[in-house]
Image: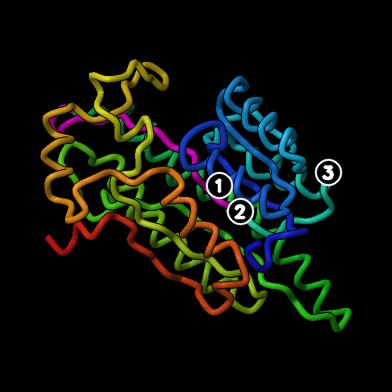
Amino acid sequence: MVEGIAGRVAIVTGAGRGIGQGVALRLAKEGASVVANDLEQGPLDETLRLIEEAGGNAAGLAASVADADVGERLAALAVERFGGLHVVVTAAGFLWDGMIHRMTDEQFHAVVNVHLGGTFRVARDAFKVMREHARQEKERGEEVPARRIVTISSLSGFGNLGQANYSAAKAGIAGLTRTLALEGAMFNVLANSLAFGFIDTRMTRAMESQSEYVGGAPQGIPDAARNKALDLIPLKRAAAVEEAVGPIVFFCSDLSTYATGALLEVNGGVHMS
């Protein structure tokens, strides 16, 4: 078992698929009670089923992270159902790519509102609860345990062809996370981010190999562009979801009690090429 996860309460957004689902399942396996969120009820129910069949504790909320009250609803569900809130992982997201000279305002704002806006809303309202619980613990003279906010940035946050919206959002998440780390330090709220490269999800698979859409926006990368990008990675492959989950769990655990404000790149060494 990974230290510092059993008995904790965690919120995971985007938990119906991909990295979010992998994180929700792993945290539950490590003994956390999980509040899982996804836009779609069907995939969310599947995650809840898998957790419960494995003997874990979970509750679900089907809602968009673009909803104004989503953070409040998730934080309230965690406290009401499981009595606290210790970990948040913001993994919800989608792509709506396009070259900047053809990108519409709708395209730009939709992606930024889900990735950056959604991370802000969920983290802000979780932080309110974490801060208040830490304040009460201090007043009682108790030790304040580390609470954690883990956000998902991207290699694209450094800039990427055809992803002005996604790149802007992911770069913003890195800055937001550092601010959370600064404001959370006095309450032992640790905030860290991961900049992932190619993880094998519907967002990075060949567009031609799947028919995945979010609100009409096709998910995936054109095969030719994908192969070119993979060739630049020293490891010459995409990562399995489990290889993304491990570093996230590190930031959720007591293995990282002195890490805050960090941006960890997990990309197969692409910046060395």
Tag 3 residue: 81
Q: Amino acid at mark 1?
A: Val
* Residue 98 spot, x, y in % from top left: 20, 30
User: Camera-side residue: 251 or 101?
Assistant: 251
Numbered mark located on residue 88 in the image: 2
Magenta residues, start to end: 88-102
**Which quadrant is home to the C terminus?**
bottom left
**Which quadrant is home to the N terminus?**
bottom right
* Residue 198 spot, x, y in % from top left: 29, 45
Q: How is the image coloured?
A: rainbow
Q: Tell me: residue 74, above or below residue 194.
A: above
Q: Disc 2 vs disc 1: Cβ atoms closer than 8 Å?
A: no
Q: Amino acid at mark 2?
A: Val
Is there any visible trace of residue 100 in the rendered image?
no
Q: Is residue 92 magenta?
A: yes
Residue 34 left/right relative to 65:
right
Mark 3 or mark 2, earlier in chain: 3
